[in-house]
Amino acid sequence: MKSLLLKLLNKNTKTRIKALIENTKAGLMRVMSKTRFTSSLYYTFFSTEFYREHQSVLKGSLRYHDNNTKAKDNRVLLRRNVHRLEKGLIMRPRRDVFATRYIQETVDAFVVTCNNQQLKKEELDWCVSVLSYFFEIAGKDSDIDKAKADYFACLEKLQSLDELTMCSVPYAKNTSEVSEITTEQLEKLFKQRRSTRWYLDQSVEMEKIERAMTIAKQAPSACNRQPFKFHVVTDKDMVNKVADTAMGTVGFGHNFPMIIAIVGDLSAYPAERDRHVIYIDGSLVAMQFALALETMELSSCMINWPDVEDREKRLEKLLDLDPHERTVMLMSVGYADPEGFIPFSHKKDNSDLIKVVK
């Protein structure tokens, strides 16, 4: 019916109707946006745009709760708390006694992950290194002493303990490896990376994707949770289907050799306050990933993922995503067609991007 009416209406009538709808909506938003309460009412009664996010945040918080209370998967909690210990260990001055509020929780999570054999070797090495160092320097305290006993009781059962380096602990800045890359070389790499939309008909080696991830995962992440996963799509039919779910790929999405969906995991957080972190951490790692690809002769294009419900449903089905998983962006990857054009895309002046706060 809607399509039939649109065909019957002339262009001027369509324009007037569209303007009327937009002005009415703007007037309603002007009234409802005056307070936070009325703004909430607007999104309760007049818009469904945040329905998916509301459910995703709740589902994520619930999964976090179930994972930790039902001893299913405590890795997120463990990673967060081990990082908290790291920050306590580097404080100046460092207190003799700290982490009393969460050290038992940390050890309990460590025991669960060890019993469930959920930690990879390097992750286990990091946890054991930091926890052992903490208990070595920690002052006398009843809570710490109990946690210490539980921790070393767990260590005695670890068969892989001899394989650990026990060196993954905080270190002085002046002992870290210094890169020989100059500012000019880094600038050249940044300018070399441009959104590439035309690719050769050539497959991308997974070894290069693995190597790029090894480099990219050094990106900063809040409390070292790293709440993201790269869904790498290589099958040509599936690549086309995933590319078609995004807006802005019409006319060139068919030539992608590979497409990657960067997906955030809201079950990494117990509270709503952290719901945006998946987008921050996911974007940081995506940028470093794209730059790493450039050093291996691979090009990429970041593809915006708008929150449009029908497209969310399509991608959710294609990638078999859970309700607590939200897509941050898509990224095409491939060997650039040397004859393909790239938009110049002038960047704003620094004066528009930097505000000095005095």
Image (tube, rainbow, N blue to C red):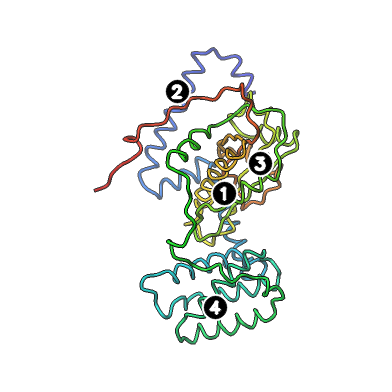
Tell me how far mark 4 sits from mark 1, CA to CA: 32 Å
Mark 2 surroundings: few (<14), some (14-19) or many (≥20) residues within 10 A: few
The residue wearing badge 3 is 313
Element at badge 4?
helix
150 vs 26: above or below: below
68 vs 281: above or below: below
Q: Position of residue 75 (x, y in %)?
A: 61, 65
Q: Position of residue 179 (x, y in %)?
A: 48, 50
Left or right of 293: which side holds 222? left
Instruction: Residue type at mark 1: give it.
Output: Ala
Mark 1 surroundings: few (<14), some (14-19) or many (≥20) residues within 10 A: many
Task: Confirm or deny contact between disc 4 and disc 2 (CB under 8 A).
Answer: no
Callout in the foreground (1, 2): 1
Mark 3 surroundings: few (<14), some (14-19) or many (≥20) residues within 10 A: few
The residue wearing badge 1 is 216
Query: Which one is in front, 172 or 4?
Result: 172
The residue wearing badge 2 is 19
Query: Which one is in front, 211 or 267?
Result: 211
